[in-house]
Amino acid sequence: MITVEEALARVCALVAPLPVEDVPLAQAAGRVLARPVAARLTQPPFDTSAMDGYAIAEADARPGAVLDVIGLSRAGEGFGGTLGRGQAVRIFTGAPVPRGAARVVIQEDVTRAGDRITLGERLDRGTNIRPAGADFTLGDTIPAPRRLRSADLALAAAMNLPALPVHRRPDVAIIATGDELVMPGEAPGPDQIVASNGFGLKAMVEAEGGIGRLLPIARDTEASLQTVFGLAEGADLIVTIGGASVGDHDLVGKVAAGLGMEQSFYKVAMRPGKPLMAGRMGKAAMIGLPGNPVSALVCAHLFLLPALRVMQGLPAAPAPRLTGRLACDLDANGPREHYMRARITADGLAPFDRQDSALLTILSEADALIVRPPGDGPRRAGEKVGYLPL
Ligand SMILES: Nc1nc2c(c(=O)[nH]1)N[C@H]1C(S)=C(S)[C@@H](COP(=O)(O)OP(=O)(O)OC[C@H]3O[C@@H](n4cnc5c(N)ncnc54)[C@H](O)[C@@H]3O)O[C@H]1N2
Ligand code: MOO
């Protein structure tokens, strides 16, 4: 058995960044920018008024000054002339500041009578002018790699970039295996249960920027598994669920090997999730998850999501880990790294009493996985521990 750290390094070594494609801004949310992109213009392109009011010369910026209004500057159409001493230009937010103006006095601080204004007794200290290039200048870049968030897309649009180079979304084929499984909505036979893991995995894959393809359930025969592996053709990553352990009907490793899978590892010193395997199958990477629902989803969190990040051009890195205080005492841990389902409470991290890897109700209630290193001694309430937010 290898450690979680070693297994993660090996999983990340099985995948590589996918090719780059240009996508329109409207479709780029959540995608990973593949290379830095440069602004095609300066923003703001000209000195801009930040307020509605009157543009005036610096020398006239004194309480009680009386000025002639000689023109208008509005967003989309500026004042063409030059403003001189004793003059003002009516101006609105977003409009170009006229030549000769050094500040904008807000209209609340001005009394207007016809084409004449009188400045009030208290004027703003600031100029109310946004200088050209205050936000960015021509050639400034958005760095990469970077998961594109809403603000990045707005910035790219402002930079006049209608499309962005991003890594292709990983195509992930998800294969549930087992004679006991039926699809949600079907009536399970007397010895059957409803397949659940695939739906959780598809959601995780898609939240991480991939495309999850739920293939038909493979039955516990070599022929059925071979057929469904065939349907995974074209996938960048094949994820199987179940059939990974040592039972007589656990055929995934054997069938995958028969189809040319080069195994990188089998079994990891972790709990839940020991019977995890990974390797390469032709052009795809393959991750064989254990069947127990919590084991499958915890392994996906630890290995599948980092692999998807690498495929999208992000650095190889473990699931983000935080530190928190325990809400209660914990017994010593065994030889496997334990990922304990827990709640984040006002008193700290509270692990659930029941940690069975079949309990989806508990996982669904959990906010965190407390990480217990192998051989970790007993811990007292209030001590600091590492955890993965869910
Ligand atoms: N003698 C041993 N037995 C087991 C060991 C072991 O080391 N020695 N390991 C145990 C551990 S730990 C796990 S985890 C499981 C994993 O086994 P498999 O990957 O072969 O999983 P299955 O046997 O196919 O299924 C386990 C469990 O999960 C249910 N299942 C499977 N797929 C789904 C699905 N898509 N949706 C919902 N539930 C699913 C399945 O019905 C079983 O109840 O092995 C232990 N045994
Ligand atoms: O490792 Mo199994 O995944 O404990 O249930």
Image: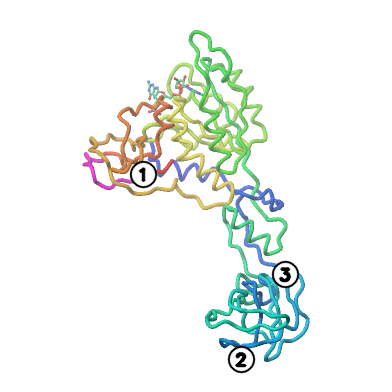
Q: Which residues are magenta?
A: 376-387
Decide which of 373, 11 is in the foreground and name it. Answer: 373
Q: Position of residue 58 (x, y in %)?
A: 61, 88
Name the outermost residue toward the top: 190
Determine the residue positioned at 62% across, 23% down: 216
Crowding at label 3, few (<14), some or many (≥20) Cα neighbours within 10 Å?
few
Q: Main secondary structure of the magenta part?
A: loop
> Cβ(mark 1) to ligand 2 < 8 Å?
no
Answer whether labels 1 and 2 touch (C-beta < 8 Å).
Answer: no
Secondary structure category for the residue under label 2: helix
Determine the residue positioned at 52% across, 19% down: 194
Q: Which amino acid type is marked by label 2?
A: Ala
Q: Is residue 383 in the magenta section?
A: yes
Mark 1 or mark 2, whichever is nearer to me: 2
Determine the residue positioned at 64% across, 22% down: 227
Residue 161's label in the rendered image is: none
Answer whether labels 1 and 3 touch (C-beta < 8 Å).
Answer: no
Q: Which residue is identified by label 2?
A: 59
Q: Quadrant of ligand 1?
A: top left
Q: Quadrant of residue 94?
A: bottom right
